[in-house]
Image: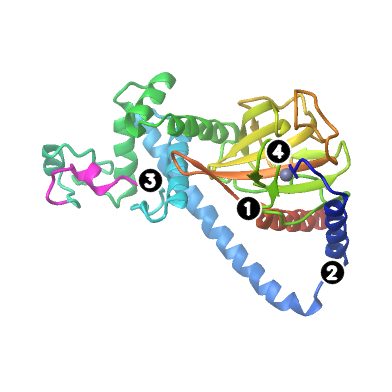
Amino acid sequence: MRQGRTSARMLTVALLAAVMMTAVPAAGNAQKTEASAEVNTKTAATDRAQQLAQRRELFERMSAVTTIPWHDFAAIDQYERSLNQALPKLRTASGTLLGIYIPPELWSGTLNPDQEDTSLTGIAMFGGIGRDGNGDGKADRTDDDDLLYTIARHVLQSGTNDEDFGIGLWEYYHNTRAVQRITQFSKIYETFGHLDLFEHAFPVPVGTRYSYRSTWGTGRSWGGYRIHEGTDIFADYGLPVRSTCYGIVEIKGWNPYGGWRIGIRDLDNVYHYYAHLSGYDKTVGVGDVVKPGQVLGWVGSSGYGKPGTQGKFPPHLHYGVYRDRGLVEWAFDPYPSLRAWEQSDRKKKKGSG
Ligand SMILES: [Zn+2]
């Protein structure tokens, strides 16, 4: 909650909602559907694991040819995929395993009358960037090897060391955010050493005392009228605030609205914002890679003033999520995700103990 006038009524409503939530009994007759849903989930998980393994193999193979590390390829591919998700009407991946989207006119050459041209001489003649990565003599936009090799050749034009990689990315995207994202993603992949990094966690430990409800778009007045972009999780001072995702710390420090806040970027190119903390875990700094459930700090009531201001409202975690669409970022409602993560954390807790 970021309104200036914090009413006791709102808090009561939130607490009441929490009591009602815990009072809902588990439905017994839903067991059968749950079981078949579980089988489907398992099949989907296996398919996904296979796909990730194939993708990894492709990155390794191209790495051997180009000297670009596999995690750089993984980062480019994942950044491209995140743009497809954000801009589905403008971009569709043309390959099978990869998320990379290269527009036809860029691939074949702007003035090429055949936008689906796969002939190396034709593409070269019209200045297209399409290359042959699998050695079949064609540059095919629907072939994963050709796509990845084309990107690699383009990025490598500037050289092969880390700095050159950044310059190469800039030459390709002409967008500093793209370069920053890909560099961030690469570090996440390199740190964990694998591609399966999309698990989530609820931002506070389940089984503790907290409450929250859907408040998307509610007005607030401190610092002028703005829309409430996030969900408030009410809890006592000192409850651990945890990362909801695998990601990298992008921002940490004081902000007049958010108080002590921290911002984390995940591999879906979503920015997770945690505000009003009472303090930070000392081990977490800007540029550090974090995992789901890792403690970032503690619930507090900091904000609405100069650095150190606190107690202007009841302690709570303000949690917001923003999706990067390449040039701009849009807030979206975290509430549905929070409910899902909370449920999954509860299940995990039951399973483990
Ligand atoms: Zn809030």
Residue at position x 87%, y 36% in the image: 238
- What secondary structure is the stretch in magenta mostly built from? loop
Looking at the picture, how far across and down is residue 154, in whole percent?
29, 32
Which three-letter amino acid code belongs to the residue tagged 4? Tyr
Label 1 belongs to which residue?
Answer: 333
Q: Amino acid at mark 2?
A: Val
Mark 4 secondary-structure assignment: strand
- Residue at disc 1, secondary structure: loop
Q: Ligand 1: which quarter?
A: top right
Image marks 4 and 1: residues in contact by CB distance under 8 Å: no
Sequence order check: which comes first, mark 4 or mark 3?
3
In the image, 257 versus 333, the foreground residue is 257
Q: Which residue is mark 4?
A: 274
Q: Residue at x 80, y 57 (%)?
A: 351
Identify residue type, mark 1. Answer: Asp
- Residue 256, how many percent across, how many down? 70, 29
| Image location of residue 291, percent across then percent down | 67, 38
Which tag, 1 or 2, sits closer to the chain's start? 2
Write down the residue under mark 3: 100
Residue matched to label 2: 24
Q: Callout 2: helix, strand or loop?
A: loop
Q: Return the disc, 4 or 1, that comes first in the chain's sequence.
A: 4
Q: Is residue 232 magenta?
A: no
Residue 296 can be seen in this image = no
- The part of the chain drawn in magenta is 101-114
Tell me the CA gap for discs 2 and 3: 45 Å
Question: How many discs mark residues in the rendered view?
Answer: 4
Contact? badges 3 and 1 (CB < 8 Å): no
Identify the mark nearer the N-term, 2 or 3: 2
